[in-house]
Image: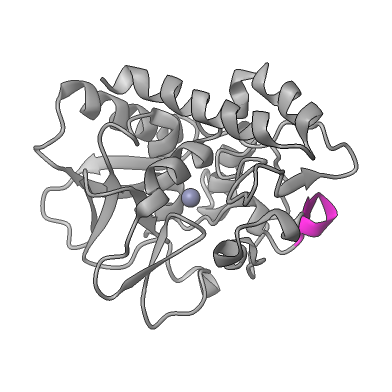
Amino acid sequence: MWIFMPIALYVSYYNVCKESKTSASLCQDEITDRDAMTAMDQILEVNRKLRAPRGLSFREGDIAIPYMRSAINCPGNACLWPKSVDGFVYVPYILSPLYDDMERITIETGMQEISSGTCIKFVPRTHEGSFLDIQPRYGCWSFLGQTGGSQTLSLQTPGCMWSGIAAHEFMHALGFVHEQSRSDRDHYVTIVWKNIMPDHIHNFRKQVTNNLNSPYDYSSVMHYGRYAFSEDGGPTIIPVPDPYIPIGQRDGPSALDLHKINVLYNCGK
Ligand SMILES: [Zn+2]
């Protein structure tokens, strides 16, 4: 069943484009490119009717934060997972028994896509007090960084069963916000405010971010798609100066995503 999900989503994405009058040519370019379906497109499709559990709210579509917190950032890197004396950063996790073998492989592939290029190691929890509790709750979402104690990371089946989506949520759990939320994003993209669903304007706020002296990454697995939260099918994010640069993808962390993890966690130092 899960194999067919991306196809269904792709069809609905095509229909949104087809109905757009303002961006028909841009859409036509996009739909010839399968990479146009970003991790975030798929997450937003799954999370369309997501309601936050009691005491939580969701920012930017898939970042869970305690209700009383107003900002989604990680001041002073206080939300980072601790580094071990052996140079690795161990992120303990438990996987819900509700996942079947294929689903476990998909989720673990998302972990490996991060750990193979960084000093992050996802390890099954034994006794650790802080850990990811990965569950097929409603929607694809994560807290930002380490919250302390057990923290839920939801990967619904079948909608979130794509390794790039798992990697996206794991990057939130490592402390990363969406790429277009970077404090310097206005140099690289134009936000088309008039095309955004009014209730979702807040999802396009810039955040106070540590950009790690790294270039803006249009191909980050953390980048919104071009039509994220679109009201009428028109683009909500347009790269500048070249509007045709592909943005976002769902294949997994980009080389720059891995680089940023290495810088944030001082891997190799
Ligand atoms: Zn996200």
Asked if 85 appears above or below 242 in the picture, the reply is below
- Identify the residue shown where x is 35% and y is 18%: 4
Give the residue furthest to the bottom. Answer: 68
Asked if 214 appears above or below 78 in the picture, the reply is above
Q: Indicate the position of residue 45 as horizontal and vertical percent values.
A: 44, 41
- Identify the residue shown where x is 64% and y is 67%: 205
Q: Indicate the position of residue 135 as horizontal and vertical percent values.
A: 20, 46
The one nearer the camera, 57 or 72, is 57
- Identify the residue shown where x is 50% and y is 53%: 265
The one nearer the camera, 244 or 259, is 244
- Identify the residue shown where x is 53% and y is 46%: 261
Q: Quadrant of residue 163?
A: top left
Within the magenta stretch, is there residue 223?
no
Bounds of the magenta segment: 184-191
Q: Quadrant of residue 246?
A: top right
Within the magenta stretch, is there residue 187?
yes
Q: Indicate the position of residue 226 as horizontal and vertical percent values.
A: 67, 41
